[in-house]
Amino acid sequence: MLKGVVSVTFRKKSVEEIIDIVKKSGLAAIEWGGDIHVPHGDVATAERVGKLTRAAGIEPISYGTYYECTKEDVPFDDVLASAVALGVKVIRVWAGKKNFDETTEEERKETYAALRYAVDAAAKKGIIVATELHINTLTNTLEGALEMLKQVPGLKTYWQCVKNAPDPEEEYAAIRTLGKNIVGTHIGGSWIDGIKHPLEELGEQVSNYISMLEELETPQYMMIEFVAGDSGEQLIKDAEFLLKA
């Protein structure tokens, strides 16, 4: 399993600083974010970041966009152009900007249509599109994610711990249910009272997650997202734990 970090973990750091930290950590991949480091439609920046990443021996595995699949958003073609220039295998998008039970049927149809376009357009470039289990989107619940996958052929999903103090059994059940639809994972220590904790506090849960995901026998990568104190030193500690898990 390929292991790396999500660049939004360090929004205040430069591309070069992030690459340096990741290289020191021993991690092998970066999911570059579309909000700060690789803006949607800025092809020149995407090309530069992709080259810098690969030159350091790190894979720019995915493009973590903030494309929301709504009429108000930038054209997906801009997002795709950046993804192609960056040289990624996966584009991560958000399924709208409201929870499933807060949307109308018409709003859901619009989001599904936007996702179908994105999936088809990206497939022509050999890129996978995936949503993630995230609040304020149609996939804020496992049920919402399953409905999304049903409505949009070819779409994939990320799995991630979605609670402050996750119940391992619920998380294991989610992995089993989503199965081979999972293309990537975000992992990190729990948020408790608004404070991020070290990854090692999840203990054997992490190795259990990895074992279950590897049993799916589909290409997988696991990305650290956010670290205690927004610290590069903490990323190195979290990476050491993850690489041993």
Image (cartoon, rainbow, N blue to C red):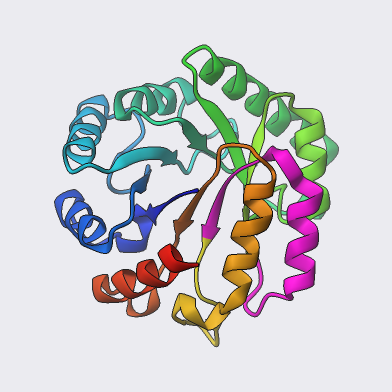
Q: Residue at x 76, y 38 (%)?
A: 148
Q: Residue at x 55, y 17 (%)?
A: 123
Above/below status of 119 relative to 238: above
Nearer to us in this view, 173 or 114? 173
Marks counted in the figure total: 0
Nearer to us in this view, 233 or 9? 233
Q: Is residue 88 left or right of residue 202?
A: left
Residue at the far top: name it.
124
Instruction: Read off the magenta span.
Output: 162-186
Q: Is residue 210 left or right of residue 245?
A: right
Nearer to us in this view, 5 or 92? 5
Whether residue 40 appears in this view of the structure is yes
Q: Position of residue 100 (x, y in %)?
A: 78, 50
Q: Residue at x 39, y 53 (%)?
A: 4
Q: Quadrant of residue 77?
A: top left
Whether residue 160 appears in this view of the structure is no
Q: Position of residue 103 (x, y in %)?
A: 78, 47
Nearer to us in this view, 55 or 96? 55
Q: Residue at x 36, y 62 (%)?
A: 9
- Residue 194 part of the magenta segment: no
